[in-house]
Amino acid sequence: IYLNNLKESEAGFYTCEVSNGFQTLTSTGFVRVKNPGI
């Protein structure tokens, strides 16, 4: 996953959820913004 053009204020925990109709999986991670605007 690539995240572009993030601001420092958008840092934090995000959850990704995927489902195939039979099961749903989730994964949570922390997004840290380094060198914003570069």
Image (spheres, rainbow, N blue to C red):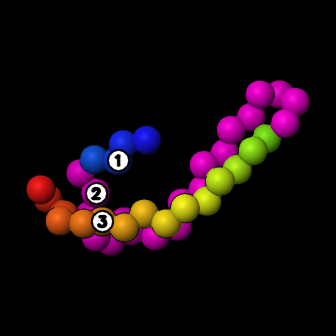
The residue positioned 55% from the left and 61% from the top of the image is 29
Tell me if label 2 and label 1 are in contact, CB under 8 Å: yes
Q: Identify whether 24 is placed above or below 37.
A: above
Residue that carries the numbered disc 1 in the rendered image:
3
Rendered residue at 66%/45% (across/down): 17
Q: Label 3, on which residue?
A: 33
User: What crowding class fits label 3: few (fewer than 14 Cα within 10 Å), some (14-19), or many (20 or more)?
Assistant: some
Rendered residue at 61%/59% (across/down) = 28
- The amino acid marked with disc number 2 is Leu
In whole angstroms, how far apart are the C-alphas of marks 3 and 1? 10 Å
Report if residue 25 lies within the magenta region: no
Q: Left or right? Give the position of 17 relative to 11.
A: right
Q: Answer yes or no: do the residues labelled 3 and 1 have beta carbons within 8 Å?
A: no
> Quick one: which residue is furthest to the top in this view?
21
Determine the residue positioned at 79% across, 41% down: 24
Q: Secondary structure at mark 2?
A: loop
Q: Position of residue 9 (x, y in %)?
A: 32, 71
23 horizontally vs 1: left or right: right
* Spatial CA span between label 2 and label 1: 7 Å
* Mark 2 / mark 3, whichever is N-terminal: 2
**What's the magenta region?**
5-23
Label 2 or label 3, whichever lies nearer to me, is: 3
Question: Circle 2 is placed at which residue position?
Answer: 6
Question: What amino acid is labelled 3 in the image?
Answer: Val
Q: Amino acid at mark 1?
A: Leu
In the rendered structure, the answer to whether residue 18 lies left or right of residue 7 reads right
Instruction: State yes or no: discs 2 and 3 in contact (Cβ < 8 Å).
Output: yes
Query: Residue 25 location in percent, x, y?
Result: 75, 44
